Amino acid sequence: MKISPSIIRIKKIESPTSPMEFDEIQLDKAEKLILKMDGVVTPLILRRTKPEQEAYTIIAGHFEYYAALKAMEIDSRKGKTINTYIDEFENEVHFYQQQI
């Protein structure tokens, strides 16, 4: 297993999970915390989907992603990038899902 820490532009990330799956009040609380702390507490775990375009999909951290998007709407300077771990091996997805 190999994961690499990285800071990624949030616009390069896609989530297969709908934001409607999360409680709006909880997202608002997390968004305020992100603004206060200048970032997410728990980094996202991503997989590269298009290396030539630097595109990523979320393996874990969908809630944090949507909270960060909300934070970016309020203060674009604080929400342009997000701390992540990049999964270097696609077959490790199952391992991450078991850990969460």
Image (cartoon, rainbow, N blue to C red):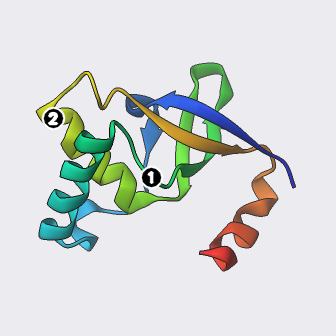
Give the labeled residue for mark 2: 73
| Distance (Cα) linking label 1 and label 2 | 19 Å
Q: Quadrant of residue 11?
A: top left
Q: Residue furthest right?
A: 1
Which residue type does callout 1 highlight?
A: Val
- Using the image as rendered, state which of residue 74 and residue 46 is in the foreground: 74
Percent position of residue 30, x then y: 25, 58
Of labels 1 and 2, earlier in sequence is 1
11, above or below 89, in the image: above
Percent position of residue 42, x then y: 49, 55
Give the labeled residue for mark 1: 41
Locate residue 34 relative to residue 12 in the image: left or right. left
Residue drawn where x is 44% and y is 52% of the image: 41
Q: Quadrant of residue 68?
A: top left
Residue drawn where x is 41% and y is 59% of the image: 62
Q: Quadrant of residue 23?
A: bottom left
SS under mark 2? helix
Percent position of residue 53, x then y: 57, 21
Mark nearest the camera among 1 and 2 is: 1
Percent position of residue 44, x then y: 52, 51
Do the numbered discs 1 and 2 sit on residues whose CB atoms are within 8 Å?
no
